[in-house]
Amino acid sequence: MTVRSALSCEGLGKRYGSTWALRDCTLRIPAGSVTALVGPNGAGKTTLLQLAVGMSAPTAGEIEIFGWSPQREPQMVLPRIGFVAQDHPLYRGFTLADMLSFGRRLNARWDEKLARRRLDSLGLQLSQRVGKLSGGQQAQVALTLALAKRPELLLLDEPAAALDPLARREFLQALMEGVAEEGVTVVLSSHILADLERVCDHLVILSRARVALADSTEEIARSHRLLTGATRGVDEIAQLHSVVHANTTDRQTTVLVRANGHVYDSHWQVSNVDLEQIVLAYLALDPVRTPEQPVMSA
Amino acid sequence: MVQFHLDSTSGVPAYLQIVQQVRQAISLGVLRPGDQLPTIKEVVGSLAINPNTVVKAYRELDLAGILDARRGQGTFVSDDVEGSPDHDYAPLRAELVKWLSRARGAGLDDEAIRALVASTLRTELSVRAVA
């Protein structure tokens, strides 16, 4: 069965001056999925999203949205995508009515009913000014505007990073309702791991401008195993499986592997690992990370 | 209407938790043949989870003949499902409460009680399998 790709890229790279912000990026995000883009700040998440919406041009390789190039065929791509940039920028002096009329004029597929229904269910009045809303409400308004555009692919850059846990939960509920109702494909970047496991079905881990792992969460959970045993070398294991992370104390060795089939080895106790632990292990591989760059703020 | 809840620390995949909760609700008589289940959107809205998770759970229960997805109407507990007989579990529960207080008296904590119940269930199952 071939599933249509919402986003696909091949050898995609973006260089700013002498620094590669994204490099050798090859991946495919299936239509209908909810994909999380995770990685520390500076790993290339925002760069990938900006390439996807055509806000910047690739230095190398290709990116396609539903088979079209965002740079060369924006007239095919732009009507199909919704983009909520970091800090959900809105016109602070606008009333909600102004925001809706703005959206209506700029978007051919604009769904006024959907927008009004969503704002109504949030308890917001059209006369309210954007600048007076709470952070959580502003995020909800930005999501409403993006969904009312009726996109086939919705891209969100750190949509919930600045929200308190309750507002984040409400935001994700609204987002998931949007997915259930409209069947929209979602790609969201995040450095908050806590909610991802229940929200996403695909995961792309970016580290040092490269893709460290990209797969369905099901396959990731299935293939990764944590091995614990008495202190010993990991060479034998590394011959059969890919070692993601190994940690040795004077008594015990703990190894996270991406298993190549089953792990049969009586020296190790084999256990399952949750997604958050797996992501953290991949991010821990990242040697450029410095303490002042928060990887997680959960 | 049933409400689902997710335990993110259990290590059990979310879709499987929903499957188990539907099965439990049926065996406890909370859900009966013909009852409607919450829509995908309702579950998604209350739990903030991926709709595909709910779709997967409902599909699995549909394939198992436990649920019946009727196009345009919703998802219902299948009429073929053996509903829980109109059992009154009160006497069993009362005995269990008594047993629990004896177990606590013997110094068992919750974890030890769960372990004892689980291991007894396992032994009983294997004894029944042999018999």
Image (tube, grey):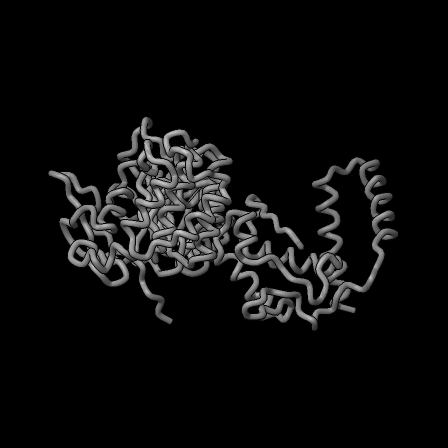
Horizontal and vertical percent position of residue A126: 42, 39
| Residue at 59% over, 46% down | B7
Task: State whether residue B111 is above or below residue B30.
Answer: above
Which part of the image, by quadrant, shows the C terminus of chain A?
A: top left
Task: State whether residue A18 is above or below residue B1.
Answer: above
Rendering quarter of residue A249: top left
Horizontal and vertical percent position of residue A53: 24, 50
Horizontal and vertical percent position of residue A140: 42, 41
| Residue at 42% over, 32% down | A133
| Residue at 49% over, 44% down | A120
Residue A227 visible (yes or no): no
Rendering quarter of residue A17: top left
Q: Nearer the viewer, residue A162 or A14?
A: A162
Q: Nearer the viewer, residue A151 or A5?
A: A151
Q: Is residue A154 left or right of residue A113?
A: left
Which part of the image, by quadrant, shows the N terminus of chain A?
A: bottom left
| Residue at 52% over, 61% down | B55
Q: Nearer the viewer, residue A107 or A38?
A: A107
Residue A184 visible (yes or no): yes
Horizontal and vertical percent position of residue A200: 43, 51
Q: Of all residues shown, which one is farthest toward the left?
A: A17
Callout count:
0
